Amino acid sequence: MAWRRRLGGVTLAVIGVLLLLLPGAADNYVLYVMTRLFVYVLVALGLNLLTGYAGQVSLGHAAFFAIGAYTAAVLAERWHWPAPLCLLAAALFTALVGYLLGLPCLRLSGLYLAMATLGFTLIVQEMLLQLAVLTHGSEGMKVAPASVLGLSINTDVRKYYLLLVVTAAMLAFARNLVRGRLGRAFLAIRDNERAAAAMGVNLAQYKTIAFALSALYTGLAGALSAFIVGFLDPQEFSFFLSIQFITIVILGGVASLLGSVLGACFLIFLPELLAGLDVWQALVYGLIMVVTILFMPFGLSGALRRYAFRWFGMGAEPIIPRRLGH
Amino acid sequence: MTEILSSQVVSGLATGCVYALIALGFVLIFKATDVVNFAQGEFVMVSGFISYTLLIGLGIHYGLVLLATIVLSGVMGVVLERVVVRPIMDAPIFSIVIATIGASIVLRSSAGILYGYDVLPLPTIFSKDPIRVGFVQFTAMDAGVIGFSLVIMVALYLFFKLTRTGTAMRATAQSQTAARLMGVSVTRIFSLTWAISAAIGGVAGVLIAPIIYLDPNLGFIGVKAFAGAILGGFGSIPGAIVGGMLLGVIENLSGYFFNAGIKQVSTYILLILVLVIRPAGLFGAAPIRKV
Amino acid sequence: MKRLLTIVGLLVLLGGVAVCAAEDGVTDKEVVIGAGLDLTGAVANWGVNIKAGMDAVFSRVNAAGGVHGRKIRLIAYDHVYQPPKAVTNAKRLVERDKIFVMMGHLGTPTTKAVMDYLQDKQVPNIFPATLASIWTNSGKYHVGDLATYADQTGLIVDYLVKERKIRKIASFYQDDEYGLDGHLAGKARLKHTHDLAYVAEVDYKRADIDFSSQAAKLKESGADAVIVQAVYREPPRLAEQCHAIGYNPVFIGPSPIVVAKTIELGGKHVEGLMGVEVYPLPTDPGAFLDQYRADMAKYAPSLPIDTTNLYGYQKAAVFVEAMQRAGRNLTRDSVLKAIESIKDWDPGWGLKYGYGGDNRRGMSNAGRLVTVKDGKWIKVGDWMELKEVGRK
């Protein structure tokens, strides 16, 4: 039994070392793809906290992502804030917006919540265009590379390490969250709101906290993405992006941090693998997506856990309620 | 002023009717199976291409094309249900939703590969010349779209009220277990629901494609229709109709009084306001929590 | 003597190898060209056709043995019109596929996103598929293509005010970077040259399907001419809805509306619609266009003859000309110099290319007015050099 428990830790350590050594072996293209992966992992973690754990479906995360990205970019451009402060401010400001959005959304659930948050995405996208004084509107906005403690994060290797460190830290933070009181409260709300309330979980408080936390992760991801890509355009933050984000979470596996990572890998790596296919790319991508969900209806992590349990006796069979967020 | 406003309302109603038809497709499937079909917009797009192929490629008469398109769209709905939805009917709802998103990508890119991404004009029997009734000015096209949509809606209402199958479908929507006990084949009803939804999408496609032209991205109109369905109350058939129409009119009026940006977001602002006051939409019943 | 020749020969060969090795994407036998296009997204129609047009030229050239013995290989990736994805593709093209130049990169926001990166890596950004003003004044590595939307709108405004004596002009524009370029240039031109202003400024979104509210506003403004900063699917619908409320102004717009599709979609409603052409129609006569039609029939038989693929085709044709001029010793610098050496060059369709001029105005700054008559685009004026019009 002990070796089984240790297996997880060893795997994690091996992956960690490989990730640390990667820049020695990979070209800039691979490193850039990896940084985009880390950004998506951060978003997926945030969205999974809200949707997977607390059961609140959001199609508003493209908006949080945009708010984070533009907050950091505007602070850096207009008021020349140092990058770490920009990142922190972007994350906190997005969390505040998330908290405020969470308040009117308290009464909504399931599809209605999804639609209201989708509306939020479209409204924020329009605001980015209208607030051209700050955001340069449809002209797009250039973002200078971040600089941390006097070190300019302007090469792909530096961007990679910055993202690696932040993502690892935020992953550890999320792990502590979901294993603690907060995570248990979220799950209780998702599975049965009345029962959770009866057990003393303050629904309103925990739901808005879930919104704020989720927005915090997504805003931070957006801000990092702004510094990495170096160019922002309001068109990018459409409802498609929101749908992409929720796809990561469902495909990866709800209420699973591993699922967030796997889902992000799926969404980032698959198009790169299919890049030579020209117009056929979208078709093959769609087919793989359908087949994956048909064979792994509980997501990649659900499938992984099921086989880990069946073959190695690790963990437990995953049980996920059918009516998520209903 | 009244003249311009009334014309705005009429052309808004025409677009709104198409939204309503697509919204109906969403709602029917949702009521029967709890699934939100994100490929509903793609039904509209594919049926547009079906009728284009029959009409231009094979030169078949317009009436026959309309009939064939409705039938073929229905078949497409059944196929999609059998292949993509039924195998994972026991999975979490959102997995099924993601499966329909995957299906929509497949349908969209297939259309792109077969027909290219350029827009195609789909012929129509309705003229685009202006008509004047009193002080209201509109086109025959507007009138045709509104009339045709209303016919479909009434036919659907009669089907649900008067036929045995319709009654069985309503029973299934209320309680699958009870329906099964009464001898209703629930799987058959599911297939039928998808067929009807896709067929209505087909009608919407034939109506809207001549106006906004045909291309593989036509299906994105489904998002607006979805908003209409939510506005009316997802799960309510009158709600879908009213919500869709309301959305068309509001879009036009806000476009007239403000600019394109406000036009784009006005419906969503209204939607959020409505939801904050009535969390289940205008006509929706308060969501029943299944404990 | 023989030994001397051998040594000289070896040295030449080594020199050649050294030169070739110095530049990415160029070997003795091959030149690799990269393109970031939208092949499945919002403007996929342009991406697919531009690629087909470029491929048609390169296939013909390769079949004839290539340019100075080098075959041209085009690698294109799909950026789905998303800036972050465009950056991914650019890095892949530059660092993995080792492209020689980036060519025909599609979309204004996507090309802006890769602009600095390409400059850092000193990879020329040749003929990006966007006629925004920015590519004509961004330095050595960015080589603009044809007359910009801004310059075209200058021509439109001058024509309306001077020749048609129209003073009530309205603007109908797509509310993004594409539509704003021409819209703002028109506004500036009206103000500075004619002391006028738009009587109405009406915008729309790219995916909008109903323009009845825009039509009503335009009618109320009483404009006699409407400048449509749109692509080809909007003018027919706008004209229809204007006619439906009994409003018949002059509709006129820049090059993206001058395609056969506009007429196919609009029918009688687009009779009298005017536009600016920056290169001939694919159906026009001319040796170059004959070759274009033959190449498309041979190498892209599934695609119809269309303005969109002709756009890619002419890019590739000019680039091949530049490679011919650069000679066997092909470097990024030599090909950029070769492009700059093109002056008064006509591939055989009446439109002359000439690079540079006062401030790097791109390959050609010619335009001419056309109109729809009896279901066909016909020319109203002759090619003329357009003046530079800023957005401010």
Image: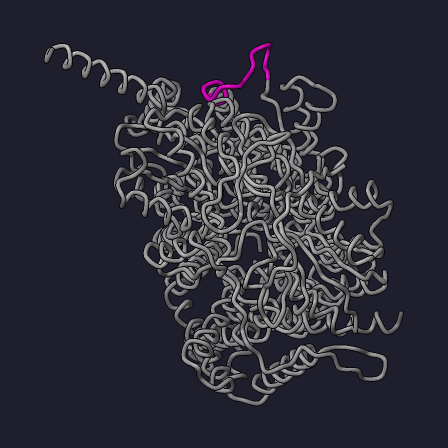
Which quadrant holds the C terminus of chain C? top right
Residue B283 in percent (x, y) is at: 71, 69
Which quadrant holds the N terminus of chain C? top left
Image: C93 above or below A146: below
- Viewer can see residue C311: yes
Nearer the observer, A46 or C324: C324
Q: Residue at x 77, y 65 (%)?
A: C249
Residue C226 in percent (x, y) is at: 75, 58
Image: C80 above or below B222: above
Q: Is residue A254 left or right of residue A104?
A: left
Image: A225 above or below A237: above
Q: Residue furthest bottom?
A: B162
Nearer the observer, C229 or C144: C144
Q: Is residue B233 left or right of residue A153?
A: right
Residue A298 in percent (x, y) is at: 41, 49
Quadrant hosting residue A188: top right
Q: Is residue C324 left or right of residue B265?
A: left
**Residue interval drawn in magenta:** A147-160
Residue A211 forms part of the magenta stretch: no
- Viewer can see residue B89: no
Residue B281 in percent (x, y) is at: 70, 63
Q: Residue at x 54, y 18 (%)?
A: A153
Q: Residue furthest left?
A: C2
